[in-house]
Image: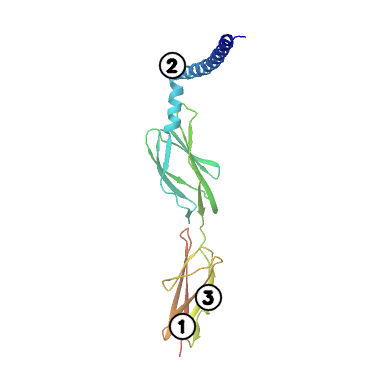
Amino acid sequence: MSRMLRHKRKKALIYLVLIVFGAIAVFTIGFQLIINGSVFVANLFGNKSDLEQINNQVLADITLDEIPSATNSSELIVSGNTYNVDILQIFLNNRQVKKLSVASKNEFNVLISSLKDGENEIYFVGEVANSNNRKKTEIYTVLSKTSKPKIEVTSPSDNSTTPQSEIKVIGSTDPGVYMRINGLPAVVSSEGNFSQSVRLNEGENKILLEAKDNAGNTEMLTLTIIYEK
């Protein structure tokens, strides 16, 4: 076989490979162009209500004012505003308790009652008219506690007499309670125990203990201690 013939065959093989790869590339790119073109045409001439529904899904919003983490009542007032929402549903502990029409106004103010003692879960769901679009807020946990915190003093005894000018008030309350003794903050342990030194004046002394929990419940106790040298 001559050198010229081998050269022609090699050149023909290269052309064949290039043609095959070119056909594959044209088919792949062309197929993708067809898909993109179909999507564009569908969006251009699609149902207007479908496009509006997509827009509603993007724009619907519910903004709530600050919700307290704890309350000393079985009722709670929640306010806020909506955007592109027609119906607002209020859920308490996974149960719908109220349904409001907010289509004509953006702001709302609603009373949620029947909170159970302990933790309560509250969330809101907004509906857009003529649409399956629903906007759900995050779940808020609110502690409802109506009972006052306890104050128990183990030392000193009420109406007792002491020869010391300084005594230590020792006792316990509920964990997480803010404690003051004669107006000064007292350290409360994670178990609810407290201990604080108090200076006495000669004669009768009144020691005021105040305990306040995060729900706003307050309890007070007064000790009478007589200091005699």
> Which numbered disc covers residue 68?
none
Mark 3: secondary structure: strand
Q: Is residue 32 above or below residue 114?
A: above
The residue shown at (37%, 37%) is 106
Q: Is residue 170 above or below residue 65?
A: below
| Identity, as a three-letter code, of the amino acid under mark 2 | Phe
Number of numbered labels in the structure image: 3
Mark 1: secondary structure: strand
Q: Which residue is mark 2?
A: 45
Mark 2: secondary structure: helix
Q: Is residue 5 above or below residue 125?
A: above
Q: Which residue is mark 3?
A: 170
Quadrant (top left, top right, bottom left, bottom right) of the N terminus: top right
The residue shown at (55%, 54%) is 118
Classify 10 Å Cα crowding around label 3: few (below 14), some (14-19), many (20 and above): some
Quadrant (top left, top right, bottom left, bottom right) of the C terminus: bottom left
> Which numbered disc covers residue 166?
1
